[in-house]
Image (tube, rainbow, N blue to C red):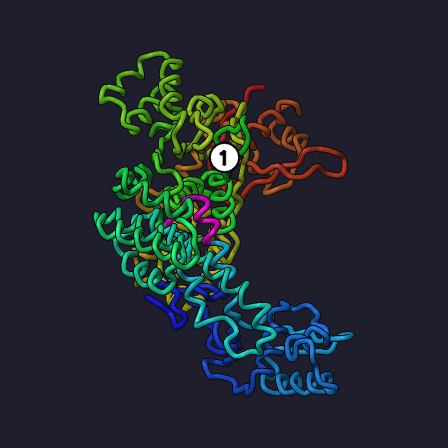
Amino acid sequence: MLNSAGVAFRPVEGAGDPHGPGADTSGALEFRLLGPVSATRAGTVIPLSGAKIHTVLAVLLLARGALVADSRLSTALWGDAPPPTSNAQIYTYVSRLRKALGNYVQIFRKGPGYVLDARAAKIDLFSFERLERLGRQALEENRHEEAGRLLGGALDCWSGYALENVTEHLLQFERPRLEFLRAQALERRIEADLSFGRHRSLVPELLSLVARFPMDENLRAHLITALHRSDRQAEAVQVYGEGRRILDEQLGVVPGQLLSGAYLRMLRGERTDTPRRPHVLLPGRAAAFTGRTAEAARLRSLLLRRPAGPAARPRAVLVTGMPGSGKTALAAEVAHGCAEAFPDGVVHADLQDTDGTARPPAAVLADILAALGETPDTRQTARQGLNELVSRYRALTADARLLVVLDDASSGVQLTALLPAGPDSALLATSRGRPACLPAGHTMNLGPLGDEDAVALLAEAVGADRIRAEPAAVRDLVRYCAGLPLALRIAGARLAARPHRTVARLSARLADPHTRLAALSYGNLNLARTFGRALARLTPATAAVLPWLASVGPGPFTARLAGEVTGLAETEAERALEELVDGSLLLAEPDGALGEDRYRFHPLVLLHADTTPRRELPR
């Protein structure tokens, strides 16, 4: 599809809107620079007459809120021959702009020039730049489908040639730069589409572009590649011959490296197939992932960042957090979103058995080797020595671009043996604590969700209308769940299963601390059982301490106070508290005024501790 300037684009939902898809911008002021300069309010064009007033508006917008000196405006309006009344005329144009635009933007005098404050407005150039930057980053990280979508959206911001109705003086300075940016975005979008295997759908568009720009070698090279992959070699040969003739007749040169390279690859029969899609073995992602937006973006950035230097190692990232904090869901969401950047596959393994005991690294390695296409009897090799399995795994992953996702690690030994060997691979692991001897270069700890994300998570489960109908009850329910994603998912599942019941009814049951944990159970989701499994991983002595600590309340409290409550020596109490922190059943606070370590309970863990039977502690 071509816009009015002959540049190809594919419409994308939400593209070009800095406020995001679905945002309500019906009353916003919008400016266009990537086509005829114009201003609209609520979809209605604001009348601005003459090239000079459009030039003043364009110069002020292009300054991005910086001061524009009178001399700069004068050069844009009249070049090197301004009239004697230039300052007065500039003042008149600015006054007309103020009147036409109203109070939606501010144009104020500052020193020897003017400043336009248009932060609340939507500007097509800025939308284009944002989408182009995101698309370029996605292309660099081999996320080709996303790159094509983003770059297509960037091109959709254009509505003609840049600055069509300004003076020739401004045009000669600004249009070449803007048109170059558009050409680069188009080039990258075609590259992304070719890499994603869209060669057949690209052929008509590239035929049109080559006809329009016959001396553009890059476009012609892409057309040859698309025709070659579409099994249309005879046409590709003709396209190359025509390009060589035009370059010789018009410029007296031979085809450059890119065009010649595409032609030679076709002659050799290289890469006629669609690029291989990664084999993804992951738990299903949530239908609508909610919350953790910043954390997901940070994880993607860490996993997709290319290692540099001769000593580059695989990227390794660990996600930690208390039981029920959504570590597994976040890891699955990020891994699914990054899969395209790892063409050799994405594999997943649970590091705990269903009873909560840690799986031996040899058994996990055997499963991963089988998932990577080793012989069917690979699972039997779990009886072999760990060193042999590690050697096979590292040999298989030495030159691979692989993402390994490991869930619920309990020790550094589990992770060290499973780190892929190649520098182009990555490891994403989850754990309730930070295991010793961890090979992860980056650790992210998940805290409770904020109220806004918590409400959004509930709305995804039960519907926005139902949430809006009972705002007070929803606020109470969110408070009782204390920002824990598992508790919120359970509450949402209970509400979704009983659409005739009110939110207030469930909220009232959660209000009673004695029935709260029992109410936070539905189907195979059980908050108390999740806490119980985490407690079972601790040493028996520490597990026995937790119920006794309930009497100190949410905290913060010190090891000295914990020792007084439990009857343990302060050093023994501190050892138990530190193990509880490592298991993410207690939160460590900053040191107090006396330099003592302090600890705090999450409200739901405190409830669990208070309802767990106490056993006599060894003295």
Mark 1 residue crowding within 10 angstroms, few (<14) / some (14–19) / many (20+) = many
- Compared with residue 202, is residue 385 higher up or lower down, i.e. above or below? above
Residue 563 or residue 8, whichever sits in front: 8
Q: Position of residue 551 (x, y in %)?
A: 58, 38
Report the residue that reaches farthest toward the right: 111
* The furthest residue to the top: 385
The secondary element bearing badge 1 is classed as: strand
Residue 410 image offset from top left, x and y in percent: 46, 27
Vertical placement of residue 293 versus 606, above or below: below
The amino acid marked with disc number 1 is Leu
Q: Which residues are magenta?
A: 135-144
Q: Residue at x 37, y 45 (%)?
A: 260
- Indicate whether 574 appears above or below 178: above
- x, y percent for residue 102: 60, 84
Q: Which residue is mark 1?
A: 318
Question: What quarter of the picture does the C terminus occupy?
Answer: top right
Q: Residue at x 31, y 48 (%)?
A: 225
Dividing the picture into quadrants, the one containing residue 347 is top left
> How many numbered marks does the figure carry?
1
Instruction: Give the side of residue 321 with respect to residue 203, left or right.
Output: right
Of residues 560 and 392, the one drawn nearer to the viewer in this rendering? 392
Residue at (54% x, 40% y) in the render: 445
Q: Which quadrant of the structure image shows residue 346?
A: top left
Q: Is 145 colored magenta in this rendering?
A: no
Q: Is residue 490 left or right of residue 34?
A: left
Determine if the magenta segment contains residue 137. Answer: yes
Does any portion of residue 357 appear in the rendered image?
yes
Does 43 appear above or below 332? below
| Prevalent SS, magenta region | helix
Residue 108, given in percent of the width and then of the height, sits at 70, 78
Q: Residue at left 63%, top 27%? A: 574
Q: Which of these two is toward me, 514 or 75? A: 75
